[in-house]
Image (tube, rainbow, N blue to C red):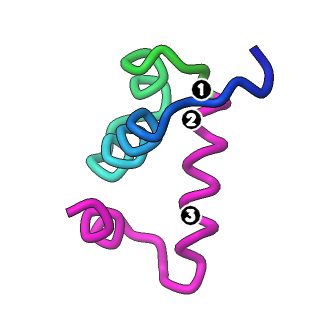
Amino acid sequence: MANKQIDMRKVKQIFKLYSEGVSKRRISSRLGLSRNTIIKYIAFFKRGLSTKKWTIRSANMFFS
């Protein structure tokens, strides 16, 4: 299923779960996405926060 787009709701769930400390493997099984997809979106998110130091706290602030 290469290049299949996922909806924004799932993207937000990825970031929210990851910021809560849920493992990438568990996120992928919960959302029905491949682990590589999860890794890709988390990398995009971290790259977007490159001006700040990546921390769980900054992710939580982003989603609250």
Label at residue 38: 2
Q: Is residue 2 rendered to the left or right of residue 37?
A: right
- In the image, residue 17 lies in the stretch drawn in magenta: no
Q: Main secondary structure of the magenta part?
A: helix
- Mark 1 vs mark 3, CA separation in Å: 16 Å
Q: Residue furthest right?
A: 2
Question: Which residue type does callout 1 highlight?
Answer: Arg
Q: Residue 60's x, y, as percent?
A: 26, 63
Label at residue 46: 3
| Residue plotted at (63% across, 54% down) | 43
Question: Which residue type does callout 2 highlight?
Answer: Ile
Q: Name which quarter of the figure residue 5 lies in.
A: top right
| Residue plotted at (54% across, 59% down) | 45
> Neighbour class for label 3 at 10 Å: few (<14), some, many (≥20)?
some
Q: Nearer the viewer, residue 1 or 42?
A: 1
Image quarter where the C terminus lies is bottom left
Q: Are marks 2 and 1 in contact (CB under 8 Å)?
A: yes
